[in-house]
């Protein structure tokens, strides 16, 4: 084991040192060489060192350089050094984080991290939660709690009886609802198309005056951080209406919820703590390794009522907060280790600074693109920038050119009918130099596309 892990350390360091020189998207040649990992299942065992070497030699070149500072796709964060280290140690620990008895340390770290998170995200005191794979499962778990709570009030036990013959629930979302929330609704039997969609403004925020009559059988789903613009629904107004009606409010705050941690951005998320449940990602803006999402519920008992599994062999060991009472899974890895380590290392000040710094980088991108005459389509108040380089064809060619060039990586999107390139700055690793280097590359490629366009016409 010792030689193997030492060699892994060497290989990991070599990989990390190569990041700044590598193409952010792997070259087609590197992806092609993945063929070398195929072949029939070996009949006999191989040496661990040989397997590791194969993995590194063929695998490492085919990675996307997400760990570097110039990947700006999909709101992907990086992994803070302390979380890479904590993750290694936790892998050596090999804990099953499902129950206190199977890992007292994992359970304790979850509890501490939850307490810190409720504080730093400005959630109501007493809020509880669970550690899931990502915001998709966090949305799923929170909406299961909502389903439980609303039907329990009608005297319906949805966990036991299912939805056959149950009183009807109504789900209200914004036009700009994230697909993962619709997916969660479909998994819960609430139907992805049975929702009522509220119109949104030019930033994707729900228009509060368009809200229908809510009842105590309504689940209202808000968004903190639109995946394109970074905009927030007007939570204060919406929560007030929903609370009066006895409706359940859920917030999908996969990345936007973290704005609460920065004094300069907290006003954006104001009012979202009037909700009943929240979903967020730690693998996005907290910068911990995948897969790491968080579900929060104002009344933790309602989440537990929707999630808890009962069996004689489990009941035997129940003392304190049982991690598996708050998530759909039983056995799982100890995600709380890295969340705890990130928060412990950053502290309140370091977290605020990381959120603020990434937002400042986004503002610099917007400024540089605008100065060159390109059209930034969103109000850049958070870490998201949408830019159009002209007609859809030229914008698509710029996106393709940027991805092939390899200096940085940005994705494409369609924003309210406009084709746009999307820049999301979510990684701790992004430096001022990364931003300038990326901006130069984007402007160089955009200029080239524009010139070749002129040549054609
Ligand atoms: C990323 C994101 C999700 C999905 O999160 P996963 O971690 O990929 O499951 C949901 N909602 C919003 C707003 C997001 O940005």
Image (cartoon, rainbow, N blue to C red):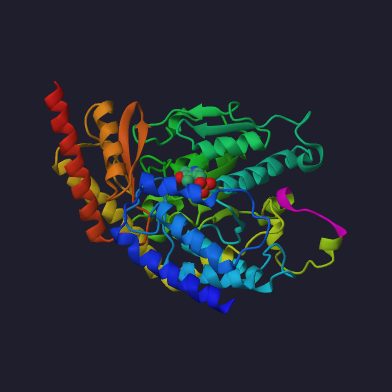
Could you tell me which residue is drawn at 31 percent across and 34 percent down? Answer: 420
Does residue 99 appear left or right of residue 124 in this picture?
right
Q: Position of residue 275 (x, y in %)?
A: 54, 47
Which quadrant is home to the C terminus?
top left
Q: Position of residue 131 (x, y in %)?
A: 60, 58
- Residue at the right extreme? 312
Query: How many numbered discs sit on the rendered protein?
Result: 0
- Residue at the bottom extreme? 2
Q: Range of the magenta residues?
A: 306-312
Could you tell me which residue is drawn at 32 percent across and 30 percent down? Answer: 419
Seen in the picture, residue 74 relative to 335 is either above or below; the reply is: above
Q: Is residue 362 magenta?
A: no
- Residue at the front extreme? 43
Q: Position of residue 114 (x, y in %)?
A: 57, 64
Which quadrant is home to the N terminus?
bottom right
Q: Position of residue 115 (x, y in %)?
A: 56, 66
Seen in the picture, residue 431 relative to 270 is either above or below; the reply is: below
Residue 115 seen in the figure: no
On the image, which quarter does residue 182 sit in?
A: top right
Does residue 275 appear left or right of residue 386 in this picture?
right
Could you tell me which residue is drawn at 64 percent across and 51 percent down? Answer: 41
Nearer to us in this view, 176 or 2: 2
Could you tell me which residue is drawn at 67 percent across and 60 percent down? Answer: 44
On the image, which quarter does residue 81 sit in?
A: bottom left
Residue 52 seen in the figure: yes
Nearer to us in this view, 224 or 10: 10
Q: Is residue 308 magenta?
A: yes
Seen in the picture, residue 396 relative to 135 is either above or below; the reply is: above
């Amino acid at each position: 084991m010792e030689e193997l892990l030492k060699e892994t350390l060497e290989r990991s360091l070599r990989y990390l040192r190569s990041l700044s020189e590598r193409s952010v998207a792997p070259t087609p040649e590197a992806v092609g060489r993945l063929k070398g990992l195929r072949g029939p299942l070996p009949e006999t065992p191989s040496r661990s060192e040989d397997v590791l070497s194969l993995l590194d030699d063929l695998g490492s070149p085919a990675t996307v350089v997400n760990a570097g500072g110039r990947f700006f796709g999909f709101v992907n964060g990086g992994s803070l050094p302390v979380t890479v280290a904590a993750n290694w140690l936790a892998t050596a620990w090999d804990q099953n984080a499902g129950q206190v008895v199977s890992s007292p340390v994992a359970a304790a770290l979850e509890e501490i991290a939850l307490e810190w998170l409720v504080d730093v995200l400005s959630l109501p005191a007493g809020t509880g939660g669970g550690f899931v794979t990502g915001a998709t499962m966090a949305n799923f778990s929170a909406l299961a709690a909502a389903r439980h709570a609303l039907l329990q009030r009608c005297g319906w036990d949805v966990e036991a009886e299912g939805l056959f013959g149950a009183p009807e629930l109504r789900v209200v979302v914004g036009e700009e609802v994230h697909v993962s929330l619709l997916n969660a609704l479909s998994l819960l039997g609430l139907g992805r198309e049975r929702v009522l969609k509220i119109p949104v403004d030019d930033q994707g925020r729900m228009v509060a005056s368009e809200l229908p009559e809510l009842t105590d059988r309504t689940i209202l789903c808000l968004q903190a951080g639109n995946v394109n613009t970074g905009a927030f629904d007007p939570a204060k107004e919406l929560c007030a209406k929903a609370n009066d009606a006895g409706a359940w409010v859920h917030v999908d705050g996969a990345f936007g919820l973290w704005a609460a941690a920065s004094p300069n951005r907290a006003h954006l998320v104001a009012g979202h703590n009037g909700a009943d449940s929240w979903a967020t990602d730690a693998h996005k803006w907290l910068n911990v390794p995948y897969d790491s999402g968080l579900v929060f519920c104002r009344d933790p008992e309602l989440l537990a009522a929707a999630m808890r599994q009962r069996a004689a062999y489990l009941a035997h060991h129940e003392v304190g907060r049982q991690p598996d009472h708050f998530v759909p899974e039983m056995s799982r890895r100890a995600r709380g280790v890295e969340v705890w380590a990130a928060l412990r290392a950053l502290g309140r000040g370091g977290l605020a600074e990381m959120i603020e710094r990434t937002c400042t980088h986004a503002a610099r991108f917007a400024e540089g693109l605008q100065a060159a005459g390109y059209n930034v389509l969103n109000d850049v108040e958070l870490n998201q920038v949408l830019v159009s380089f002209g007609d859809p064809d030229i914008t698509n060619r710029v996106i393709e050119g940027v991805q092939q060039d390899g200096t940085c990586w940005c994705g494409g999107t369609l924003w309210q009918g406009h084709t746009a390139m999307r820049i999301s700055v979510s990684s701790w690793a992004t430096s001022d130099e990364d931003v300038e280097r990326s901006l130069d590359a984007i402007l160089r490629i955009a200029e080239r596309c524009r010139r070749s366009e002129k040549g054609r016409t």
